[in-house]
Amino acid sequence: MQLQSGERSVLAYFPTAQQAKTAQAMLNQKGYTETKIDRVSEYPNTELYGNSSAALSSLVLGVEAYDGPSPLLAADPDASGMAGYSELPGSKSFLLTLVTTADKIDEAVQILKEHGARI
């Protein structure tokens, strides 16, 4: 995407898809039309619980047992469930991208923050 002269972009990260969709709906009500929500993950497979393998890395991280980097992913602290919460990668994995004019940035950022975004 290339911005036109006078346009600005805002990247807002949310912990849940629902929060991102709610913020997007509010922005649309206020007249912001160029918004997009994407899922961002450090792991290539985002279908976390979609397979029938009994391996813990398969259930938690969405990878097949013994497939490529699976043993390394299984060693990830997230796979055990024992990791403490310290703003882990992926904790704000829903990205809302907004394109608007410079004069409307402050209002848009305020709306996004009110819905739990990290800008």
Image (cartoon, grey):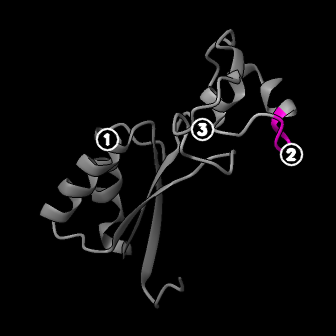
Up-down relation of residue 90 to residue 96 (above or below): above
Location of residue 61 in the rendering, given as x and y in whole percent from the top left corner: 65, 34
Location of residue 46 in the rendering, given as x and y in whole percent from the top left corner: 57, 46
Q: Secondary structure at mark 1?
A: helix
The answer to whether the residues at label 3 and label 1 have Cβ atoms under 8 Å apart is: no
Up-down relation of residue 28 to residue 81 (above or below): below
Is residue 69 magenta-colored? yes
Location of residue 77 in the rendering, given as x and y in whole percent from the top left corner: 75, 19
- Residue occupying image coordinates x 65% and y 23%: 54
Q: Amino acid at mark 3?
A: Gly
Mark linked to residue 45: none
Q: Is residue 110 left or right of residue 76?
A: left
Disc on the earlier residue, 2 or 1: 1
Disc on the earlier residue, 3 or 2: 2
Up-down relation of residue 10 to residue 18 (above or below): below
- Residue occupying image coordinates x 52% and y 34%: 49
- Residue occupying image coordinates x 61% and y 16%: 85
**Would you name the residue on which mark 2 appears?**
68
Q: Which residues are magenta?
A: 66-70
Q: Mark 2 to mark 1: distance in Å? A: 34 Å
The number of numbered badges drawn on the structure is 3
Disc on the earlier residue, 3 or 1: 1
Which residue reaches farthest left? 29
Q: Amino acid at mark 1?
A: Gln
Q: Name the one closer to the observer, 53 or 34.
A: 53
Q: Mark 3 to mark 2: distance in Å? A: 21 Å
Q: Amino acid at mark 2?
A: Gly
**Would you name the residue on which mark 3 appears?**
90
The answer to whether the residues at label 2 and label 1 have Cβ atoms under 8 Å apart is: no
Q: Mark 3 to mark 1: distance in Å? A: 15 Å
